[in-house]
Image (tube, helix red, strand yellow):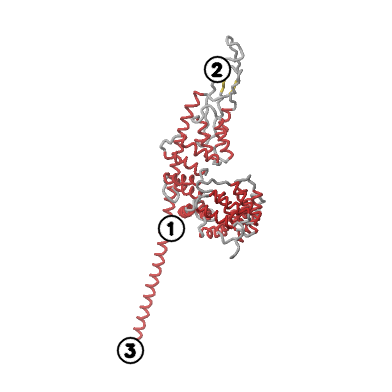
């Protein structure tokens, strides 16, 4: 009988406990088999700790310990790749892109494909190593049978990073090759190309929608969001905010922090016009703003400026406007410059402060432009309050006069609310006009297409007519020839 390797019996017992759902006992057996050098037991324990099971919590720290045991004892490529992935994500260990790159390289040297792909991505993005697009291309080209490598090469040709020469035709061919293998990243990239009309391709919303739908079957979150955007703006389909919101919420179920999905859910709530409460809209805007969506930061600035969220402080409005400016919003800078003079000084309440005189200057006139750029202005207002100092005899009030700049409470709230209501109405009108313009553009494209089809039909009919005329002419000539021959025969007979 062939001798069993050390640790095989506790390993088999661990399998039995694992299949019975008794994971603690399985781990005890596998730990014992692992200490005797049984590699498969070490990997089984690592995977159980890494993935977790029902009623058995995930423990990445212990998973890393077993992966390292397998990597150091058996130079296992899978374990090295897993360790690199945990360092890359900071999962169970402090994040270190350099350590991740080292482990990916060790696993790639043993021919582990996932490690090779991760190594190429590191060279492409410069994570853990200096960017080197040619090394990334070499690794992608070596493993070109996999669709992810096709996408990597296509992106290099698409964007032409560094000294790598961009080539639109090559990029499209590589994307299409990966999309034919049902790779969701390739389907998404091709959908974006048709949606934007880039790389020399004409805009085709129907083709973009089909590609996004194909990628969405794999829960590709950006594709799901783009399907919602196409429905929201009526591109390649009818405008339907309900369907759009369904797709945006589906994207949030995949990634609840997705900035664009959160922003468009808030947009759907605003466009529906059902009077959605602000406490329902604000959380979506907050998540979108923290994902550096400039439009969401701008909207939050307007909410705080209006005072419905915080009536006494404008610093938050300035903070969000500044964040919108940093993220590249077109109108946030104008709002920020108009708002800053209004809150240049905020009164600090000290124990010995007795009386405060508050003066608010009228800000400079706003620049011409959009409704959203109109700042709030109020005339100079003076308010005086008197407070008893706790360190002085209460029979003799002591007052100190300090000048500061604050917005007028009487003249701030009412005009601001009216202005924001006008903003909301104008925004709804602009969105509806935009949708109508897009619909009219669709109608124009349809008419042009019909005109092209009619021109083609006329061209074909003209060709047929010419052919018919040529046929008739040839028929007449043939008949004339036959007539001449008959006349000749008659003359010969007479002679």
Helix, strand or loop under label 1: helix
- Residue at image location 52% in from the left, 41% down from the top: 288
Residue placed under numbered mark 3 in the picture:
493
Mark before the other along the chain sequence, 1 or 2: 2
Is 473 left, or right, of 45 in this rendering?
left
What percent of the width, then of the height, locates residue 32? 60, 52
In 3D space, how far apart are the residues under numbered discs 1 and 3 (Cα atoms)? 62 Å
Quarter the C terminus occupies:
bottom left
Q: Quadrant of residue 401?
A: top right
Q: Residues within 10 Å of mark 3 (few under 14, many from 20)?
A: few
Residue placed under numbered mark 2 in the picture:
385
Which residue is situated farthest in the bottom direction here? 495
Q: Which mark is residue 100?
A: none
Quarter the N terminus occupies:
bottom right
Helix, strand or loop under label 3: helix
Whether label 1 touches label 3, CB < 8 Å: no
Asked if one can make out residue 410 in the rendered structure from this viewpoint, the answer is: yes
Residue placed under numbered mark 1 in the picture:
452
């Amino acid at each position: 009988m062939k001798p069993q390797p050390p640790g095989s019996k506790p390993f088999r017992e661990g399998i039995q406990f694992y299949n019975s759902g008794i994971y603690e006992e399985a781990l005890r057996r596998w730990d014992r088999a692992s200490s005797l050098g049984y590699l498969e037991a070490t990997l089984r324990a690592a995977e159980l700790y890494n993935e977790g099971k029902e009623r058995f919590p995930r423990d990445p720290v212990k998973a890393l310990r077993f992966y390292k045991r397998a990597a150091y004892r058996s130079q296992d490529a899978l374990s090295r790749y897993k360790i690199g992935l945990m360092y890359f994500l900071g999962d169970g260990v402090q994040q270190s892109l350099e350590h991740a790159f080292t482990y990916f390289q060790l696993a790639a040297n043993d021919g582990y494909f996932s490690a090779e792909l991760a190594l190429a991505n590191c060279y492409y993005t410069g994570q853990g190593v200096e960017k080197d697009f040619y090394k990334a291309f070499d690794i992608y080209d070596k493993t070109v049978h996999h669709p992810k490598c096709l996408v990597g090469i296509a992106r290099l040709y698409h964007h032409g990073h560094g000294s790598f020469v961009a080539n639109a035709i090559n990029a499209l061919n590589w994307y299409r090759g990966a999309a034919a293998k049902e790779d969701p990243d390739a389907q998404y990239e091709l959908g974006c190309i048709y949606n934007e009309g880039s790389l020399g391709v004409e805009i085709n919303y129907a083709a973009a929608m089909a590609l996004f739908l194909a990628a969405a079957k794999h829960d590709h979150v950006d594709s799901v969001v783009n399907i919602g955007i196409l429905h929201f703006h009526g591109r390649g389909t009818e405008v339907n905010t309900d369907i759009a919101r369904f797709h945006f919420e589906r994207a949030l179920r995949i990634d609840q922090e997705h900035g664009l999905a959160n922003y468009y859910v808030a947009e759907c709530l605003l466009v529906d016009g059902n009077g959605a409460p602000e406490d329902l809209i604000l959380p979506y805007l907050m998540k979108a703003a923290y994902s550096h969506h400039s439009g969401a930061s701008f909207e939050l600035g307007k909410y705080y400026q209006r005072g419905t969220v915080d009536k006494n402080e404008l610093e938050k409005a300035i903070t969000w406007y500044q964040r919108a400016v940093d993220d590249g919003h077109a109108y946030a800078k104008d709002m920020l410059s108009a708002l800053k003079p209004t809150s240049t000084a905020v009164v600090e309440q000290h124990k010995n402060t007795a009386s405060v005189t508050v003066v608010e200057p009228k800000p400079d006139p706003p620049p011409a432009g959009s409704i959203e750029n109109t700042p709030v202005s109020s005339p100079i207002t003076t308010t005086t309050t008197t407070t008893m100092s706790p360190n002085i005899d209460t029979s003799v009030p002591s007052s100190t006069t300090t000048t500061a700049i604050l917005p007028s409470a009487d003249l701030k709230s009412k005009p601001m609310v009216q202005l924001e209501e006008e903003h909301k109405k104008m925004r709804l009108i602009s969105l509806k006009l935009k949708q109508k313009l897009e619909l009219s553009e669709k109608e124009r494209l349809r008419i042009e297409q019909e005109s092209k089809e009619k021109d083609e039909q006329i061209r074909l009919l003209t060709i047929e007519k010419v052919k018919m005329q040529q046929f008739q002419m040839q028929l007449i000539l043939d008949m004339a020839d036959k007539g001449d021959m008959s006349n000749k025969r008659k003359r010969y007979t007479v002679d």
